[in-house]
Amino acid sequence: MYLLGIDVGSSSVKASLVNAENGKCVASDFSPKVEMEITALKSGWAEQHPDSWWNNFKAALKNILSESGVNSSDIKAIGISYQMHGLVLVDKNQQVLRPSIIWCDSRAVPYGEKAFKGIGEEQCLSHLLNSPGNFTASKLAWVKENEPELFAKIDKIMLPGDYIAMKLTGDITTTVSGLSEGIFWDFQNNCVSEDILNYYGFDKSIIPAILPTFAEQGKVTAFAAKELGLAEGTPVTYRAGDQPNNALSLNVFNPGEIAATAGTSGVVYGVNGNVKYDPQSRVNTFAHVNHTSESTRLGVLLCVNGTGILNSWMKKNVAPENMSYKEIDAMAEKIAIGSGGISILPFGNGAERMLGNKETGCSIHGINFNKHGKAEILRAAQEGIVFAFAYGMEVMQGMGIDTRIIRAGFANMFMSSIFRDTLAGVTGATIELFNTDGSVGAAKGAGIGAGIYKSNVEAFSTLEKLKSTEPDAKNETAYKEAYELWKSKL
C-alpha cells in the first residue's frame, strides 16, 4: 500500500511515493531539471502557466512509477503541497483564463495597502489576522481593475494546489487553510470574509466549495487516470500550502512547536493555539493544517530574507578562496561566542517585513582593525542570521507562542553547528533535525486524510531524526549578551 505526494513549487514539481506501512520513500523525482520558467512582462511581475505545473507533475510521476515498479492500483491516496498565494482563474468549462500570478509577483501591493486602510487596519488584523497585502485577494483585485473583460469570464478562483486537485478529480474545491493564505477567511466569524468580498466587489460565487484539509477531496477521473498512469478512483485526501505542509512534514502540529527553514531566505513557522495577531503586522498568520473552528491551530509565519544568502556572500567575498562551507564552519568555530564584539545585521536581501518593510541593508558593527580577522567576521555572520530569527521569534512569543521545540530538515544553514548551537542558546529551544521533504510530507498527509493513519503521531512515528541540539546552560549568558549587543545595532 502506497501514498503519493505532490509538491508544486515555483522552481520545480516534485513527486514521491511512500510505503504506508513503514513510512519510507520508495521513489522520488522532480521536473524540470532546470528551474521552471517565470515570466515577468513588467518589473515586479511573476507569472507561470498552470499547465506547466501539470506537465511537470506528469513527467515526475512517470519516472517514479517506472523506477519503483509500483502498480498504480496500490496507491491508496494522494496529497498535494503547493506554492502559496498564487492566483489561478478558470471559466465555466474549467479552462484557465490567464497565467497564474504567483507568490513573488508584487503588482498587487498598492491594492492591498489601500484595502488595509479602506476596511480598517484593526478590522483587518482582528478578523483576517493579516493586512490584505500582496496576497491572492489583492491579486484578484488587480485583475478586476486591469483586465475587466477577462474578470467577467471568471467562474472560480483557485490556489495552485486547488488547480492540481481540479485536474486530478474534475472538482473545484478549496480549504480554510488555503482561503486564509489568500486573505479570504474571517477568523472571528469562521466564514469567507464579507469585508474582503464587499470592499473589492467580488461575488461570493467565485469561491470554490470548502472541504477539510484532511478528507476525501475528490477521486481521480478516468481521463486523468489515463493521462497519468494512475488508477481511476484514487482519492485525493490532503492539500496544503508549502509552509504549512513543511510544518506537517516535520510533525509540527501543536502550540509551541516550530518548523524552520534556512536556505537563501529563512522561514520560521510556529503553531499558535489562540486567535491572535501582531498589531504591527510583522508576521503573517494563516490556518494551520489541523485548524478547526473548535480547535484553534494557527500557523504564524516569519520570513527573514537575509539568511543563507549572507553566508553565501561571505563564502564568495570574505572566506579564503575555494574554502568549503564545512571548512568555513571549522574556522569560525575557533572564535568565541559573540565574535569578539562584532555584530552583523543580515538584512541585505530586500525589505524585511519584521522590520516594518524597511530595506536597511546589511551592516557590520564593531570591527577592530587591530584584533579582528576573517574568522570573527564569518562567525558574526552566522550569529547575525540566528539573531534575526530570534528577533522575529520574539514577535511570535508576544502572540503567545511559547517556543519549546524547533524542527527543521538537515539542510542549508542547519548543517552548521554554529548556527544550531546559537539558535538553541538564544531561544532556549531544542533543535531537532530530520530527513524529510514536502512531497513526502504531502504523501503522509494523504494517509491521515484517507484514514490509513489514525493520527499525525502514527503517520510520523517513522520520521527519522538525524540530530538534536539542546540549549547549553553554561553558555546561556554569553549568547544572550551577544544577542543584546546585536539588537542595540538595529
Image: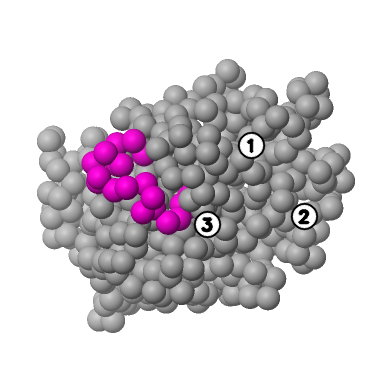
Please state, as top left, top right, bottom left or bottom right, where the N terminus lies in the image. bottom left
Which one is closest to the eye, mark 2 or mark 3?
3
Residue, x 42% and y 56% (percent of image)? 76
Residue found at the very far top of the displayed protein: 41
Q: Is residue 118 left or right of residue 50?
A: right
Mark before the other along the chain sequence, 2 or 3:
2
The amino acid pointed to by label 3 is: Thr
Q: Which residue is mark 2?
A: 192
Residue type at mark 2 is: Val
Q: Nearer the viewer, residue 2 or 344?
A: 2
**Is tag 1's residue or tag 3's residue first in the polypeptide sequence?**
1
Where in the figure is residue 79, as x and y percent of width and height?
47, 53
* Labels 1 and 3 touching (C-beta < 8 A): no
Colour option used: one colour
Q: Residue at x 27, y 60 (%)?
A: 24
Dot 3 alpha-carbon crowd within 10 angstroms: few under 14, some 14 to 19, many 20 or more: many
Percent across and percent down for residue 128 are 72, 57
Give the residue pinned by disc 3.
237
Question: The residue tagged with tag 2: helix, strand or loop?
Answer: strand
Provide the residue designation for mark 1. 87
Label 2 crowd (10 A; few <14 / some 14-19 / many >=20): many
Q: Which residue range is magenta in the image?
A: 61-81
Above or below for 215 versus 412 = below
Q: Secondary structure at mark 3?
A: strand
* Count of numbered badges drawn on the protein: 3
Is 353 a magenta residue? no
Left or right: 469 as drawn, with respect to 447: left
Label 1: state its secondary structure: loop
Would you say residue 67 sits in the magenta stretch?
A: yes
Q: Which mark is residue 139?
A: none
